Amino acid sequence: MKYCVLVAYVPDTASIIKIGGAGNRIDEGGIKWIISPYDEFALEEAIRLKEARGGEVTVITYAPDRGSTGLRECLARGADHAVHVVGGEATFGDAFAIARVLAAAVQKAGPFDLVFCGIKGVGSDQSLVGAMVAELLDVPHVSGVVKLEVGEGSLTAQRDVEGGTEVFTAPLPCLVAAHKGLNEPRYPSLKGIMAAKKVPIQTWKPADLGLDEAALGWAEATTRWLKLELPPAKAGGTILKGEEDPAGAARELARLLRHEAKAI
Amino acid sequence: MGCILTFVEQRGGVPRKASLEALSQARRLAQGAGWTVCAVLVGHGVKDRAAELGAWGATTVYVADEEKFAAFSAEGYAAAIVAAAKACPPAAIFMAATITGKDLSGRLAARLGVGCLADVVAVSLAGDHVQAVRPVYSGKALATVDGGRSSPVVVTLRPNVFPAEAGGAPAQVVELPPVEAAIRSKVVEVKASEGGELDVAEADIIVSGGRGIKAAENFALIRSLAEPLGAAVGASRAVVDAGWIAHKHQVGQTGKVVSPSLYIACGISGAIQHLAGMSSSKVIVAINKDPEAPIFKVADYGVVGDLFQVIPPLVEEIKKLKQE
């Protein structure tokens, strides 16, 4: 079996976000970059399948130069091959353009039986790229997978929905967008880190995939970030001291929620 | 003049609240611009309820009522919406940013070769451009995004943000001819959670527990507060990672991003990742014994104290108020 994992390289979830550039991007100064947490579940699942059934795992990212650091980490965890499509500045935030680049890269690096990605990149938080790539590749997809069983030529997958769980079946090849709960990702081993240094990273530009990144950029973007703002700061709230008279504070809180906030 | 086509999700033939919110918002936008609003209903045995959607703003409801749509499939439902869009045709396609909506929107947008404004909390028309505000970096920033080059642009609207307003005549119902769809990935079973547990993403009130509750069994205390409020139970990442409660309850950057009308954080210190997931809630209450906890910075009301001593009398007081 051949597995592909699409990874996004995003600001650490502990990052403090500041506005930079022309006011429609974040200030990247001081940002630490990480593999998107949901992509870790995707990668772990592919590596576990490989370990259980044999095969190869290829990771693909579409990112500026820094993306190669993320790919090395994926290799250290157990991926066999890595493809870095260098770019992403022009198509920033436009999920459809990103999906077109990734789908073309999957096609060139493939074919694959299973393509994995995270349910979302913790950044632009769109949850779109996976299903878009699947549509562009003309394969089925299952999004938000928390349990996966891969059989001969097909899979069964579960996802949590509001008020329950849905069980899906799909034939292979298929795209699976992973959610938290699917597995517990491993840390890279020292041996893995050393071995990963020797693996060559395949580097492509969008042009190598028959795509003109500039043409996919601002001029042709299906969605454009016009402005980025920080949420309005909150005024100081009413703080009740409940150390000595917890019941009194509780009564006052209930009263405020009822009569002032009208929230209950 | 444009049209906004709204996909209405249903369960057992009953339209979901988040879809009625999206439909109502479509009507508010359309009224200001002289546009029209259509809806598309997909399922099996659903057509009898279609005309009712007029009350929520649709003048025409396209119905794809076929056995193959009894269970959800992104491929099948996207094909049905494309069929409705051919008949309509819309300048924008709205749907609720539910789990189904988020899944379907990417498939649909790619099939149409257009973009999607995902999980928006505000949406407006700038001439014939649909523009929206969407939380990014898990709510640490807000992006204003233009979908003007996408025709039609797909827009998913965050549940619980836009009011659903009823009032209006029954809609004209148009049954779509059988839709051709290659359905490969599909739902084969739906398991309801025990006791029909309310999901944090849909709840109007959320009571969340963090490390300060000290042990898994103390979620009983959180539930005792949630119950009289009709609230969903949320959790911080720390207690989910500790295995005290399932991940679907997690609120925050690697959990669910929520905006209920009331969020009560109990024993949650307020890590930046948690704040990112709930700070857009309308009213925030924090109960924590550490007066320096970051959660108090975003709280509208806070109680500095031991939650084991504060919550029981709070539950009694709320029950009393509810009886008044």
Image: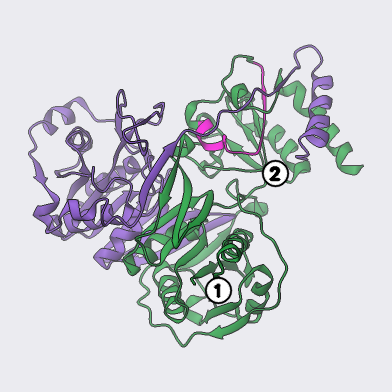
Chain colours: A purple, B green
What residue is shown at x 11% (from left), y 53% (from top)?
Answer: A207
In the figure, residue A195 lies in which quadrant?
top left
Relative to A233, does residue A61 appear above or below in the rendering? below
Chain letter for mark 1, please: B
Check chain identity for marks 1 and 2: say if they share one: yes
Q: Would residue B244 appear left or right of B310 to someone viewing this image?
A: left
Q: Are there few (<14), some (14-19), or many (20+) residues within 10 Å of tag 2?
A: many
Residue B283 is one of the magenta-drawn residues:
yes
Q: Is residue A172 visible?
A: no
In the rendering, at what x and y percent does residue B208 appear? 63, 35
In which quadrant of the rendered image does the C terminus of chain A lie? Answer: top right
- The type of residue carrying mark 2 is Ala
Relative to A135, does residue A35 appear above or below in the rendering? above
In the rendering, at what x and y percent does residue B230 appear? 74, 46
Distance in Å between CA atoms under marks 1 and 2 = 33 Å
Of B263 and B134, nearer the camera is: B134
In the figure, residue B37 lies in which quadrant?
bottom right
In which quadrant of the rendered image does the N terminus of chain A lie? Answer: bottom left
Q: Mark 1 sits on what residue? A: B38
In the figure, residue B324 lies in which quadrant?
top right
What residue is shown at x 68% (from left), y 75% (from top)?
Answer: B52
- SS at mark 1 in the image: strand
Q: Mark 2 sits on what residue? A: B231
Q: Nearer the viewer, mark 1 or mark 2?
A: 1
User: Which of marks 2 and 1 precedes in the sequence?
Assistant: 1
Of B38 and B227, nearer the camera is: B38
